[in-house]
Amino acid sequence: MDLALTENQQMLKTAARDFIEKEYPWQKVRDIQESETGFSQETWRQVTKLGWPGLPFPEAYGGTAGDLLDAAVLLEEIGRGLLPSPFTSTVILCGLPILEFGTAEQRDDFLPPIASGQRVMAFALTEADPRYEASSVTLEARRDGDAYVLNGRKLFVRDANIADHLLVVARTGDGGAPEGGITLFLVDATTPGIETALLKSAAMDRQCDVTFADVRVPASRVLGKEGEGWPIVEWVLQRGVLAECAELVGVMQKVLETSVEYAKNRVQFGRPIGSFQAIQFKVADMATDVDGARFITYHAIWRLTEGQPAGDDIARAKIWVSDASRRVVREGHQIHGGIGFIKEHFLYLYFRRAKTGELMFGTADAHRRTLAASLLD
Amino acid sequence: MDFQLPDNVEEFRSEIKEFIDAEWPESLRNKSQTEISYEEERTFCKKLAKKGWLVMSLPEEYGGKRRSILEQYIFQETMAYYGAPYGTTATTIVAPTLMRYGTDEQKSTFIPRIAAGEIDFALGYSEPNAGTDLASLQLRAELDGDEYVLNGTKMFTSLAHKADYCWLAARTDTDAPKHKGISLFIVDMKAPGITTRPLWTMGGGRTNQTFWDNVRVPVSQRIGEENQGWYYVATALDFERIGVFPVSRVRRQFDRLVEYVRTADFGGYRPAQDPDVRRRIADLSTDLEVAQMLSYRAAWMVSQGQVPNYEAAMVKIFGTELQQRLTHTATQVLELYGQLLEGSPHAPANGYFEQAYEAAVMPTFGAGSNEILRQIIAARGMGLPRG
Ligand SMILES: Cc1cc2nc3c(=O)[nH]c(=O)nc-3n(C[C@H](O)[C@H](O)[C@H](O)COP(=O)(O)OP(=O)(O)OC[C@H]3O[C@@H](n4cnc5c(N)ncnc54)[C@H](O)[C@@H]3O)c2cc1C
């Protein structure tokens, strides 16, 4: 057993933290969030220079052959600084499944530009029924010669407005059970018939409403086999859940650190408020929530990377992190009092990031159902 | 025991409801805080004034109606339910305090205009370093002839950018113990030397930081005796006991949630059919009833001439924390739609629930922080030794 970060991971963490703290004070983050695209090309260029997009890919594709744990270390720092970036969308939700399930040609096509930061991607799964279930997928893909024609609508698609390509989950047939008949497509985002509109989400994280009207996709762009896409979606979702959890651990960490600092310095009744037991209890609960969140997340990731059954652990991670992140932000606000209620305070951004994270990749209740089914059925 | 409100109170409730239907219609009720203008509120308050409801507890010569405690209670609950403006700093703090401690001139100058809804007050208590520990406030008032000169900074001076006057607490004695060097003033907001900086808040509201630079206020606008201000501030808070936290404000949010969920259909997913959603709605409904009972109990005690000092604390703590639970549950049962902000395509009820979730952050530390109120329940209520 060794619960410490490796030397490389520690270096990665320190470098990421230093970079984000120096270059991205929260006011700058907010300005990027509020800009038209919610994204900064310059930021993406900088993180590319640091080698982030190539992190989990083999060297043959221009990567540095890291794993999901390394990515989690990075994501924690991204969450801690709320750095706006399509890292999860591009690398975790699209790049990794291409590496795992793509043909040699698809890998050669996609992975080098992803690893070098040239290509941004978005994963288009959720629809009007926003739950992460096979039965929610209705976007239709009809075979037409050597292409497919896509019609339908995706909602809450992060980064679709800045993506060069989309990984789209569609229904190619009625496969009996909802899990049957699902197929994934690598779609050029500039294909005629795709319309993208930005939603205003709490996290200001570029979630989009994407409509597909007779969008033609060559048959060579099917990822995996026609009709057998749902297991790939589940594979992606497992990693998506964990990436979200890792970011939220960073969010919680920042709220904890700053609340402790504030409790030390804010004086009422002639003493720092941190000397009152009521505030000490809060800080203790917050710290426990954060540490619990971190280790339950890293444990699930570790099991996944070790090839052990990890489904239950992933569900537990999201259940805990969804609820704990909300608790930590609430107590952080309570400790800060009025000043934290002002929009011009960094806590506001963390509050909203946590709300989105609580719901993204399945609510705590959705994961409770999964876990209970696994334990009981 | 009898949980039924007296007939006259029920009749009054119907009368209020009719008035609201006419003057604060559905279109205004469902507006968010960002959408309701100050002018709309003022206009409405003038209509309340015509009914004699703006300062209903006062004697009739001052525009009041001498309404009973339960009538006042039901008024607040009904108004709060429909999101209609009712209690302002002017009506809940200034008028009752002036009634007790004001000079005849102060009473006749201010109370009739307050009762008529003609003038409005900002509340100048909090400062950058004086929040929960209000008595440590430092804004200085120094006597110079027949005027005081004010210098300092106030924080969270809501309405300072709109109000005609400020009800201000300032330090008149720097040597005395902190509770014994504070005085209260009415300051004309048009007086030279006041600068206002907006602070935009979560949930879509606005408050201000205000800077006071050699602002002059006549001695005649000091309330009561010099250095007795803390005592007046504390008694003013007593007037608020039945209105600490209107439970109906949460009931309104609950009802809107139920109404929304009942018919919500997200691409074939009907949250109303979801057992987890159903359980959560049932729990909230139960919590809400507990809040209602705690609130009735406090109001009933006041109506019996008793002082509910820890019972009122329970209403505030339970109600404000329930509001946080309810609004986060609301955003949660709406799945990803729950995180869409006002103005976003696809936002349920135009982001009402998300905005309510933001706004619910403040009441747990504002108007008597829940930490302090818990100490009150434990010490005053349960007789534990003070820490
Ligand atoms: C939107 C808004 C509008 C407002 N409007 C007005 C207004 O119009 N006029 C006005 O005067 N004020 C106004 N306020 C100020 C409000 O009354 C204060 O926010 C409140 O008194 C809390 O003070 P604080 O924010 O300085 O928090 P602090 O007093 O710094 O408290 C921070 C935390 O420490 C805790 N704490 C403090 N002391 C103790 C203790 N002894 N034991 C345990 N815990 C403790 C508190 O409970 C809280 O959790 C407004 C505030 C807001 C946010």
Image (cartoon, coloured by chain):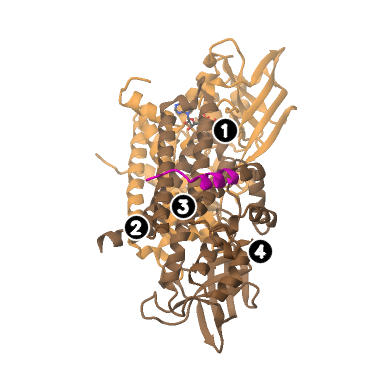
Q: Which mark is residue A245?
A: 3
Residue A10 forms part of the magenta stretch: yes
Question: What colour is chain B?
Answer: orange
Q: Amino acid at mark 2?
A: Asp
Q: Are marks 1 and 2 on the same chain?
A: no
Work out whether residue B61 can be spotted: no
Residue at horizontal 59%, vertical 65%?
Answer: A61
State if disc 4 and disc 1 touch (CB < 8 Å). no
Q: Main secondary structure of the magenta part?
A: helix
The first of marks 2 and 3 along the sequence is: 3
Q: Chain of mark 4?
A: A
Q: Residues within 10 Å of mark 1 (few under 14, many from 20)?
A: many
Task: Name the subunit of mark 1.
Answer: B
Label for residue B90?
1
Q: Choose mark 4 or mark 3, whichever is in front.
A: 4
Q: Amino acid at mark 4?
A: Gln
- Quick check: A356 above or below B176? below
Quarter of the picture containing the C terminus of chain A is bottom left
**Side of B110 where A298 appears, left or right:** left
Determine which of the numbered discs, if any, sits on residue A118 in the image.
Answer: 4
Q: Is residue B97 visible?
A: yes
Label 3 Cα neighbours within 10 Å, binned few <14 / some 14-19 / many ≥20: many
Tell me how far mark 2 sits from mark 3, CA to CA.
15 Å
Residue type of the residue flagged with mark 1: Ala
Q: Which residue range is magenta in the image?
A: A1-16
Q: Secondary structure at mark 3?
A: helix
The verdict on a common chain for dots 2 and 3 is yes
